[in-house]
Amino acid sequence: MKPPPTVHLTPGKRVLFLTKDPDLIRRQLAGELDLTMDDLTVDDLLDDINTDVMTPAWVCFNHRPEDLAREAYAGLIVDGERLFERDALYNGGFEVIVSGHRKGVGSSRETAVQAEKWSGVRIAVAASFAPIHAANNINQGVLMTDHEILRRLQAGEGVPLEEFYRDYDPITQLIVRQGGLFPLAKALARKEIEWPADETAERPMTMAEKILARHALGGGDRFVKPGDSLVVEVDGGYSHEFTTAQVQYFLEQEYGADYQIENAARFAVFEDHLIYADEVPMMLPFMDKIERLRELQVSFQRHTEVRDFSARDGISPGICHEVAREVLISPGDFIQATDSHTCMGGCNNALAWGVGATEYANLIHSGFTMAEVPESIRFELVGHLPEGVTAKDLMLYILLEFARPQVTLKRVMEFTGPGIATLSMDERATLTNMATECSARGAIVEADDETFRWVKKRRPEIDESELRARAVRADPGAHYDGGVHTIDLSSIRPMVAHPGDPDHGIPSDPTNGALVEEVEDVAIDIAYGGSCTAGKIDDRIFYHQVVKEAADAGLSVADGVVFLIQVGSESVERFCRENGFMETFAKAGVTVIQPGCGACIGCGPGVSERDDQVTVSAINRNYKGRSGPGRLYLASPLTVAASAFTGRITAYREGMFQREQPRTT
Ligand code: SF4
């Protein structure tokens, strides 16, 4: 529905403030309290509300938005209890929801927006929004604004609609004015609106700008700059069993059961996220819904004939982002998929970011999407990482130093410099994978000979000269709104991100970086090495390096600790078998799990079961509740493996397990 030209609050409808004080939220939900902006400051409001809190994984087993809404904010747990009971938001009569900074961090799940919208919320208020979450609000027709405009609305003022969108690019303005992405697409099809024309003069461009310029309709040799609005051709994309059912639902709702999609061979479905859900006791009540999601993905794949990466005999071919970089993504590509870690594909010198189900449904239907050219930030890497330090430590450092002060926010992170050549393709993939934790738009690594060799090895049919021709490199003099930052890799030390104290206003967040040596003596219960971030071949090499050293010293995994290693794809598993890793892992008491997402999303072996458990994990997110109720520290594969044998969070040092030799006199 199109929003009115002047926005008023509706008499009888309410405003919900998500305060740091949980009791105030409880009283608002109970109907005992109504607040205004005059009663609070922005500092009183919850920051960094992540989408896992708004709609935890188990809530997303409902693919119909009206069902999701009934469990809105089910992941907001205080002292072990749900703050929002079932139907609390749905029955609360709220049309505005208010929080602090960076609303909607975390996964790209559009369900978070749907849960609010189908509960009656039409305006979201925050000091800032995570980029994918903001796009999801816009695509769903939910207005976003700040606390000052809310103050005016609560004073009874009518606020012109323009004030809700005037800072957006022209395309986004059109989407807001039409009431969402599908209404805009239909208005365009009916030729009711004109597309805004952007004519940017010749200028030096960043890598992301070059890829978007090349893919823009009417492209040719055009130039673009941040803020330009483009209609962009998409080279490929994918969805997985957690999201495909919604994509199908929206396509059927908008275009009928006989909908068609463009260029099916460029797109794919994966079965990876829920493949081991039946091994998690908490998930057992949802197995019927999970099975339904699988069935709906199968019917979508048959209907559309997109590429099929379904499980065979219960074994997944791998995590979508790992398989996609192996077999789908080439230098110079523009890739869109329904998952926030789609950005991982940037390691192949591609531009890739995650989108919600609405945007994905729209782009596979038409073959095109709409994009605002993002700003960029450039990291020039020099030197070598020291022994015992990995790309994960570098990324935890960047999260602390650049993402925490929001320098990376909404920008494309460009990785260049001579230090790139010292990082394998798998290590580069760790950097691009965690761009979404930086609330960045994406990340892209400059291509070199290793890029082309790696892609060609996995896709021998590709003409290498074509790969080289499609690769992009920033122009000399390209402008970086986020600045150019030189990082000396030799200065990086083993890092963790600690779990914070969410019950007392310190969010669990990947930006909670600290040196391992600074972390207090933390005993662990679970060590987990897996996920798209840390399920690659080089991660296996790191785990194996530590496990072999420990096993050779006669050690097993520490008493009371479980150490699980989960491979990212079939090809990673094959590598482990061919190189004898499985025997070493078995000898030292490590449990190896077949490809898939698993514990990372709370749907597989390795999740914590009690809130007093501590996990050290090589995954990308430490949001409370995502991987079970316990406290989760993020760390590198080396730190995870070393900690599994010491029983405490410990940085790896070569030779650390060697027995002391008896002294001779
Ligand atoms: S491994 Fe985790 S972060 Fe990666 S795609 Fe799967 S659920 Fe998402």
Image (spheres, rainbow, N blue to C red):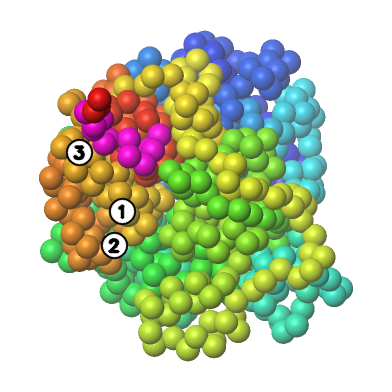
Q: Nearer the viewer, residue 360 or 213?
A: 213
Q: Nearer the viewer, residue 176 or 546?
A: 546
**476 sits to left or right of 268:** right
**126 sits to left or right of 310:** right
Tell me which label, 1 or 2, sits earlier in the chain: 1
Q: Disc 1, disc 2: CB below 8 Å? A: yes
Where is residue 392? Give x, y as percent: 47, 46
Q: Is mark 2 within 8 Å of ligand 1?
A: no
Image position of 534 with respect to 514: above or below:
below
Q: Is most of the magenta stretch helix, strand or loop?
A: loop
The circle drawn on residue 572 is: 2
- Report whether residue 46 is seen: yes
Q: Nearer the viewer, mark 1 or mark 2?
A: 1
Image position of 459 with respect to 440: above or below:
below
The residue lying at 36 percent from left, 28 percent from top is: 649
Q: Residues within 10 Å of mark 3 (few under 14, many from 20)?
A: some
Where is residue 420? Give x, y as percent: 57, 61
Residue reaching furthest front? 665
Q: Nearer the viewer, mark 3 or mark 1?
A: 3
Tag 3 residue:
553
Image position of 55 with respect to 411: above or below:
above
Amino acid on which the number 1 mark rests in the picture: Arg
Range drawn in magenta = 651-662
Tag 1 residue:
540
Where is residue 460? Give x, y as percent: 38, 84
